[in-house]
Amino acid sequence: MKNQIRDGPAVQYAKWCIESDNEKAPHYVKLQAQQWLNLVDGGTTDVYVDEKAYDKICKLLKLMAHPDLECSIFDGLEDYQWLLITAVFCTKYIDGRRYYETALLEIARKNFKTFTAAVVFLLLMLTEPHFSRFFSVAPDLKLSSELKVAIRKIIKSSPALADDAVFKVLRSEIRCKLTDSEYTPLAYSQDKMDGKLAHAFLADEAGAMDNYPIEAMRSSQITLRSKLGIIISTQYPNDNNAMLDEIDISKKTLDGLIDNRRRFSLLYEPDSYLLQDDQWQTNDLVIYQSNPVAVKNQEIFQAVCDMRTMAVLYENKRENFLCKHCNIKFKGLGVEGYVEITKVRECKQAENPEFWKGKSVYLGLDLSQTDDNTAVAMATAVNGVLYAKVWGFIPADRKDYKSKKEGVDYNRLIQQGVCFACGDEVIDYGFVERFVLNLEKEYGVNVIQCGYDRWNALSTVQKLESSCMECVEIKQHSSVLHSPTKLLKEKILSKQFCYDENLLLEVNFQNARCKYDTNLNLYVAKKFCDGKVDMVVALLNATYLIEQDMLFGTDDFIVQT
């Protein structure tokens, strides 16, 4: 029997994405495509891709007329749309529940984003249980109305749907009479989000909103057996928006740093290596990776190229082009990930306390302010290999808040011994100081020096020095940090770095972003990082001391000026 899904456009597109020599599909799309293909191939016993559901979706798409093309929507869908729709509607648990609860689409303009959302809502209204309620949330009434207009356009263009016995288009909502379901567009600027039971919702242009609308919708779904939240946006230039958080969670999920498997994400943004050396001005891969429709549609590709030409010539057009047509934050140009998380993980080893006995070690501190994370790193070099063990510290009363906000299970990390909860609303520095001073006894090591950032550390440093620990200030400046940043990266890439298993450290590496200063010094730039990087900073401080010892010896330590 012919397998419709395996032979269908969603699977074929996913297979194209993961081709080893295919650079037109961005990294995280490749990861998601591979993970979904594993489910198609029966990679788990409790999840499958439902042929009957797929057949139903296909029949409905054939009944819908494409309002801009002389064909059905079935024949007019783009490849990425097939993948999104098939994954969301047809991937299920064996008990019939929908597998994916969140679908995230980061995509540039001119890729039929609103049309995609319109098709999804029509399918929801026709396939979900009777009396279901659906909402879309947009920043303002204009955007919210555009989606409703797109849905209405498909209905009116499709003879099978245009009958009043099927859909009723009203001023404030659209009703499906076959299922007694309703779709209501909401505008964040004027509508309250609380108190609405959303069987499924869409957050449109999430990059222009804060987290409240999405969280309000999710809160309404808590009691539902099968629920769905669809979040769609291009990139926006601001630093505080809901889309950035959602993208970060998706990346960490796809990288295996957090367990959020009921999340399907298509992140069409250029890979980090394409963000360097102004490649956006000439490298067509930047366009292809952020504009999946442009891969096959020459007209759209040329239109984006024309806008690129203008953005190169005129600086006032640059931000709009990079954000809206390349999914690049304008101020993020020149920012790159520190080290690929897969490379970091190759350096992981099982904890072995015996290894540390008798070792001479260097410590690195990154002390937080108020409720932020604090980190302590212990490192040594043996036969050219850098060994490290790193711990985190958080306020005890903020564990749950931080777990939810950062997508990190701090309770689990505390149980694993890589993180400590101390203090109430703020870090108990006394706990950290006692921890540092006890390392020699606990691990049988000889602490040579402790490197620290002067910020918020003077009191702690005074107490450490009063206990005869030599402390060295490490200025957090690119000219100082460039060398250890480069050295640590080289050690990781050459597999001359080993760290005791530590998921929180891996998350920190994933969050870390680097920048070059005007003298081409590479450094971890905290303000550009996607989350906590205190463990990486502490490790870099320890690495700096090790490097200084390698170069000059402890007796000839160079004081920074």
Image (cartoon, grey):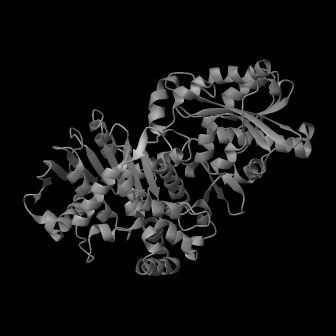
Q: Quadrant of residue 472?
A: top right
Q: Residue furthest left?
A: 164
Residue 425 can be seen in this image: yes
Image spot of residue 510 (x, y percent): 60, 46
Residue 455 seen in the figure? no
* 378 is higher (above) or lower (below) than 66: above
* 139, 122: nearer the viewer: 122
Residue at (30% x, 37% y) in the render: 219
Q: Residue at x 23, y 57 (%)?
A: 122
Q: Residue at x 55, y 60 (%)?
A: 18
Q: Is residue 320 left or right of residue 432?
A: left
Horizontally, is 147 left or right of 382 in the view?
Answer: left
In this rendered view, identify the residue nearer to me: 335 or 470.
335
> Residue, x 37% and y 71% (percent of image)?
110
Q: Quadrant of residue 63?
A: bottom left
Splitting the image into 4 quarters, where does residue 479 fall? bottom right
Which quarter of the figure is the N terminus placed in? bottom left
Q: Position of residue 528 (x, y in %)?
A: 56, 52
Is residue 104 left or right of 551 when viewed as pictured? left
